[in-house]
Image (spheres, rainbow, N blue to C red):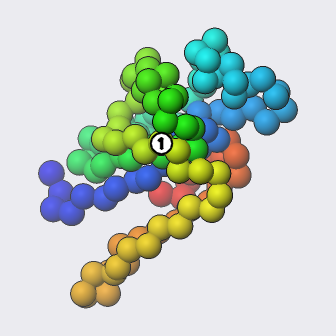
Amino acid sequence: MKSKIDTLFLDIDGCLFEEDNTDPTHFRELLAGRKAPVVLPRVLDFLEKWVHEGNKLIFTTGRAEPFRTITMRQLDALSLPYDQLIMNVGTGVRILVNNNSKDGSVKAKAVAIETNGDFTKEM
């Protein structure tokens, strides 16, 4: 186990699950449990490796709190590992603020991708 644990904050829809912006019913069907989410390519392998290396995964989503149960069922059905699920973060800009180490080591990174993009290339 490594001495310092990294934490990945990962949005669900459009970063973890495929998001279909061309179908207006897609999200509604997903939240109703009538449509199964599709995990984006390379995501599952990346997450399994990330956790195996001793790191933490925190999933974030703009989904409202009443959708926690269906969201957790979807994550579990796809065997996606995570440590925490933060709901209802809104749809605006998400800003990470953290201090650097006293030795000057950077302790925060932000990665912005296109919807359904491959964040694993940035890690």
* Percent coordinates x, y for residue 113 in the rendering: 65, 55
Nearer to us in this view, 69 or 101: 69
* Percent coordinates x, y for residue 109 in the rendering: 47, 68
- Residue 55 seen in the figure: yes
* Percent coordinates x, y for residue 79 in the rendering: 39, 23
Q: Residues within 10 Å of mark 1 (few under 14, many from 20)?
A: some
Task: Please name the amino acid that badge 1 sits on.
Answer: Met
Judge whether 92 appears above or below 99 on screen: above
- Residue 50 seen in the figure: no
* Percent coordinates x, y for residue 6 in the rendering: 31, 58
Q: Residue at x 79, y 36 (%)?
A: 21
Q: Residue at x 78, y 23 (%)?
A: 25
Find numbered disc 1 in the image and state the secondary structure of the residue it sits on.
loop
- Give the mark count: 1
Report the residue that reaches farthest toward the front: 66
Nearer to us in this view, 120 or 30: 30
**Circle 1 is placed at which residue position?**
87
Report the residue that reaches farthest toward the top: 34
Q: Residue at x 47, y 42 (%)?
A: 87
Task: Decide if residue 111 is on the left or right side of residue 92.
Answer: left
Q: Residue at x 24, y 87 (%)?
A: 102
Judge whether 19 appears above or below 114 on screen: above
Task: Decide if residue 27 is on the left or right side of residue 121.
Answer: right
